[in-house]
């Protein structure tokens, strides 16, 4: 086996196991019908695919999205690294509530067109293409808008999605300057701006996008099993390629700030990065199970944490942020178990580098502010931006980083 | 207006200048830049003593022994050069195809190539 691609092969194995699990869980016929519903239904936040198509179809959708994305990197001969791992697992996570095997293509095609326009290899933009699919709900959202004739709504959705893909790369690169890499979900900030401009124009011309909340509440032991299996496979494979559990390297990894671009696969090796991913998955799944059952969006949050555990997240820099978010959730007017709050408590880890760089107190402040921001900014983009917490986290980082830096300069003067 | 490629090269040079100034006792750095079919950057850094040269050499070898990751570079290159606090030398390592290091007395010479 080519060592450059062994992580890709491991991920494909896990995604195949998702497909098998989905078919075994619900049966092939139900999965096919479920996938049909997932493709046809609108996907804006919060649309839990467990509710729309069933658990089996959701896992098959996620497995297929994972295989598609990993195959793109394999075809382009891109060696797995932290950023690629984060992109693949984030996409698989959001394939539980918003991305599906149909709606991802127009935006990715738009990014491909941009690479041709710039006369550069698509490899340069592959990472952006995968991340940019956070605006995939745009494709189908224009169906039913009163300002658009029904016959043209799908064509309009495709064209707008392609246009979004075409403008995404320069905006994503530029948005990094706003927060200096302290918001890990940078493309969420980018997509938040794009979706806000899009939705404000839709509203200005008389259209509106209705709110949506589909949230699966039941417990399913099979889902808990497949997730535990996934995280254990990561840890076991880490031991296989590393020869042992590399505790010392893991301790060193936990001392890093996690600011973009802290690529654990490059700094400590693929095995240590995988070990960190598996541990983070188990810890945050256990934390989630204390307050909620697993469903599509929650698993999306967990997989995003796991993916970014190859690119900046670890226990030391995420726990203070989650603690700050938990305090905010306890004190504010929202229920601790309401869907948006639960998601904010998982996705607030986008701000982990603030805790890693400036200490746990600032990390808690960031987590505290993040929850309120995440609960408010959804109106701006009407749920079109699946990475709502990336948008919120980016805004919090833009607010906090100049203040923290100014305070530290004064203290160190 | 500068091309994106030239902006990236300037950012790489900024980041390395920042690294040398922050992490060594150097008081003399010279850099040269050749834009041809491939871009070659050369740094000559006067360092304090052999111990410092060895420390910097090891760090640079670690940074640049990583292969070039074009997809990471395209998304994140704007982070190099001007951050408030951080060290983005690891990212710079992902933006270079080849490197070599020479030592002449108390001078460390770093060559970087981008294709």
Image (spheres, coloured by chain):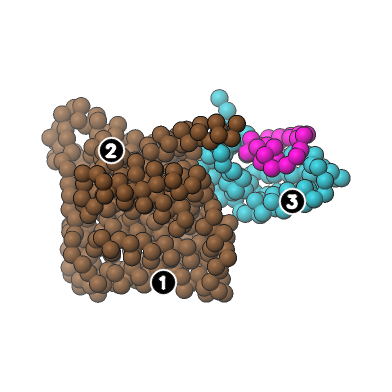
- Subunit that carries the residue with mark 3: B
Q: Position of residue A337 (x, y in %)?
A: 22, 54
User: What quarter of the picture does the N terminus of chain A occupy?
Assistant: bottom right
Q: Position of residue B113 (x, y in %)?
A: 68, 44
What's the mark number on residue A281?
none
Please check the rendered image and state whether residue A109 is part of the magenta-colored stretch, yes or no: no
Q: Tally the numbered discs.
A: 3
User: Which chain is disc 2 placed on?
Assistant: A
Q: Position of residue A48 (x, y in %)?
A: 22, 55
Decide: few, some or many residues near mark 1? Use Cα within 10 Å; few <14, some 14-19, many ≥20.
some
SS for dot 3:
helix
Q: In the image, which residues are magenta? A: B13-41
Vertical relation: B65 (above or below) A410: below
Seen in the image, is A188 located left or right of residue A244? left
In the displayed structure, A382 sits above or below A247; it is above
Q: Which residue is at a point 54% across and 58% down the rendered structure image? A: A253
Mark 3 closeness class: few <14, some 14–19, many ≥20 residues within 10 Å: few
Can you tell which chain is drawn brown?
A
What is the number of the mark on residue A232? 1
Name the colour assigned to chain B in the rendering: cyan
The correct choice, above or below, for B112 with respect to A399 in the image is: below
Check if mark 1's residue and mark 2's residue have beta carbons within 8 Å: no
**Residue under the point 44% across and 69% down:** A234
The residue beneath circle 2 is A377
* Residue B55 appears in view: yes
Left/right placement of residue B14 relative to residue A192 reads right
């Amino acid at each position: 086996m080519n060592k450059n691609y062994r992580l890709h092969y491991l991920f494909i194995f896990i995604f195949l196991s998702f497909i098998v699990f989905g078919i075994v869980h619900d049966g092939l016929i139900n999965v096919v019908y479920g996938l049909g519903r997932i493709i046809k239904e609108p996907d804006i936040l919060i649309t839990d695919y467990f509710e729309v198509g069933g658990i089996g179809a959701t896992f098959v959708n996620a497995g297929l999205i994972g295989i598609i994305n990993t195959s793109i990197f394999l075809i382009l001969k891109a060696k797995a690294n932290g950023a690629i791992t984060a992109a693949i697992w984030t996409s698989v996570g959001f394939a539980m509530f918003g991305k599906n095997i149909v709606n991802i293509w127009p935006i990715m095609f738009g990014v491909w067109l941009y690479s041709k326009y710039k006369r550069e290899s698509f490899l340069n933009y592959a990472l952006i293409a995968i991340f940019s699919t956070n605006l995939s709900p745009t494709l189908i959202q224009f169906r039913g808008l009163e300002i658009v004739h029904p016959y043209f709504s799908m064509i309009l959705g495709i064209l707008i999605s392609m246009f979004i893909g075409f403008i995404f790369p320069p905006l994503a690169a530029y948005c990094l300057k706003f927060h200096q890499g302290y918001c890990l979900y940078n493309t969420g900030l980018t997509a938040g701006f794009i979706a806000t401009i899009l939705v404000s124009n839709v509203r200005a011309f008389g259209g509106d996008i209705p709110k949506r909340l589909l949230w699966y509440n039941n417990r399913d032991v099979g889902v808990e099993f497949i997730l535990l299996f996934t995280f254990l496979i990561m840890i076991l494979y880490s031991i296989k390629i590393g020869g042992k559990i590399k505790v010392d390297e893991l301790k060193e990894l936990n001392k890093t700030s996690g600011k973009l671009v802290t690529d654990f696969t490059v700094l400590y090796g693929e095995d240590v990065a995988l070990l960190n991913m598996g541990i983070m998955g188990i810890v945050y799944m256990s934390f989630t199970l204390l307050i909620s059952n697993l469903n599509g969006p929650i698993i999306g949050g967990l997989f995003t944490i796991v993916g970014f555990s190859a690119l900046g997240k670890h226990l030391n820099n995420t726990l203070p942020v989650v603690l700050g978010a938990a305090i905010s959730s306890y004190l504010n007017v929202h229920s601790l178990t309401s869907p948006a709050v639960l998601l904010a408590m998982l996705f607030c880890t986008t701000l982990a580098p603030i805790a890693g760089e400036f200490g746990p107190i600032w990390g808690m402040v960031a987590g505290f502010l993040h929850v309120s921001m995440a609960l408010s900014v959804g109106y701006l983009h009407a749920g079109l931006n699946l990475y709502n917490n990336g948008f919120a986290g980016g805004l919090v980082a833009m607010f906090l980083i100049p203040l923290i830096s100014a305070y530290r300069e004064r203290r160190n003067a | 207006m500068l091309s994106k490629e030239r902006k990236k090269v300037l950012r790489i040079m900024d980041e390395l200048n920042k690294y040398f100034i922050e992490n060594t006792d150097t008081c003399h750095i010279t850099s040269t830049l050749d834009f041809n079919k491939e871009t070659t950057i050369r740094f000559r850094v006067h360092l304090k003593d052999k111990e410092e040269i060895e420390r910097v050499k090891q760090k640079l070898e670690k940074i640049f022994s990583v292969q070039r990751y074009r997809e990471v570079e395209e998304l994140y290159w704007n982070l190099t050069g001007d951050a408030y606090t951080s060290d983005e030398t690891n990212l710079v390592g992902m933006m270079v195809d080849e490197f070599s290091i020479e030592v002449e007395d108390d001078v460390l010479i770093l060559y970087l190539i981008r294709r």
